[in-house]
Image (cartoon, rainbow, N blue to C red):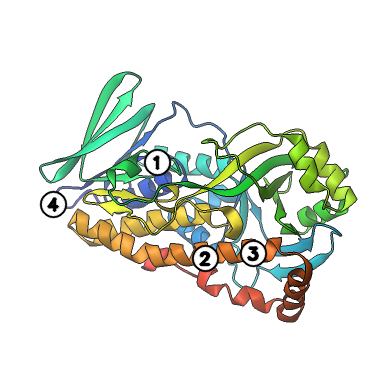
Amino acid sequence: MTGNSNNTKARKHAVIAGAGVAGLTAALALANKGFKVTLCERTGVFSEVGAGLQLSPNVTRLLNRLGVLEALFTRATVTKAIALLSAKTGETLLSLSTTAISQTDTAPFLAVHRADLQAVLVAKALETTDISIRTGLTFQSVSDLNGKVEVSFLHGEEPHRVEADVLIGADGVWSTVRSAVPGHSDTRHSGYTAWRATVPVTDALPDAFRNLCANWTVGAFLSPGAHLVAYPLRNGSLLNLVLVTPGTDSTHGWDNSVDLAVLAQTLEQFEPLLRDCLASVTNWRSWPLHGCPPEGAWTSGRVALAGDAAHAMTPFAAQGACMAIEDAIALANCLAKVDDVPTALAAYETVRKPRVTKVIARGKFNRFAYHVSGPAAFARNAVFALRGQKLMSELDWLYRFDAGSV
């Protein structure tokens, strides 16, 4: 049995709305701290959604402590380098080895399909006695109840209520739990759209893509106003593609059909072999990129937001899932160390906001650097050539951070 159930004090009960990365990680972390956890998911089944994501050492060390990293290795790709390339020529502008800060067995850089990460977390949660997973529950409201909270859900058309010590809203960028936190930030469209696809790794891929896969490298192809990120998934059998372009579509949904004419306009800037390969991909899906500024409130009384529900961010720093995992660990630590729940949640918000704000600022810097043109692009490339591998050590604050020690 996971957790410390021998305490003479009554064990606290946490209800988590949302069984994505943040919710599942929070459930496991809280169970390890001796909490009883009820994890509620709106959908009826856990389906394969999303695409690839990057997990850097700041969170793989946390997943290792939760006991899921070994299972993740069988589904993931260990990233050995990060390369920035010209989309127009395919030339490598900067290549950064990750070996200096990656501990392959306990804190690696990984590239993984979101569905594979979710599957590993779900499997661990299902074998954890202190976690109860309930599906098909849609959050409705939360109210105070004599020092606890009563959380109301709908199961189909039937009301379902759960009494607990704390409610954690881990229900994503369009969170409904967010409405229970006065002063929260609202989501807003970023002005960008992500075009996502995966393709099999074959000899038919252009050399630039096959080289990324052969060398276990994450590559970002830079062009004015847009960029493409490509990296191998599932031990090199798939290539994940994410093309970020300006976009005005603010549809509330991750998985939309695409207008290939718009895609073709962006690809005009790309090296011909890359352009032809990308144009031939038939499974592109469109994901409008929304954000939720971190300045708003994340907590109120016995309610807390985590991950995208608190601070959804665009993917320019490749840290969205990572910040959700860090949130979950820090939140569990605060609740375990501070007996009074509202005080613990306030402490969580205090320690996490500066970190998340700094990561979002880094993402904004990356967006600028990736999308510049003309003289600014020449200056960027000169900095890449001058600084080289030293640029990786300047990110120690990001990758060496340990949310478990906060």
Q: To which residue does mark 4 refer?
A: 8
Label 3: few (<14), some or many (≥20) within 10 Å?
some
Horizontal side of 268 relative to 53 (left or right) equals: right
**Amino acid on which the number 4 mark rests in the picture:** Thr
Query: SS for tag 2?
Result: helix
Q: In this view of the protein, can residue 202 be seen by the observer? A: no
The answer to whether marks 3 and 4 mark residues whose Cβ atoms lie closer than 8 Å is no
**Marks 2/1: CA distance?**
23 Å
**Disc 3 or 4, which lies upstream in sequence?**
4
Q: Position of residue 74 (x, y in %)?
A: 61, 47
Q: To which residue does mark 1 refer?
A: 175
Q: To which residue does mark 2 refer?
A: 361
Question: Compared to 349, does 205 lie above or below?
Answer: above
**Marks 3/4: CA distance?**
55 Å
**Disc 4 or 1, which lies upstream in sequence?**
4
Foreground mark, 3 or 4?
A: 3
Query: SS for tag 4?
Result: loop
Q: Which residue lies furthest to the bottom in this view?
A: 386
**Disc 3 or 2, which lies upstream in sequence?**
2
Residue 368 circle label: 3
Foreground mark, 1 or 3?
A: 3
**Amino acid on which the number 3 mark rests in the picture:** Phe
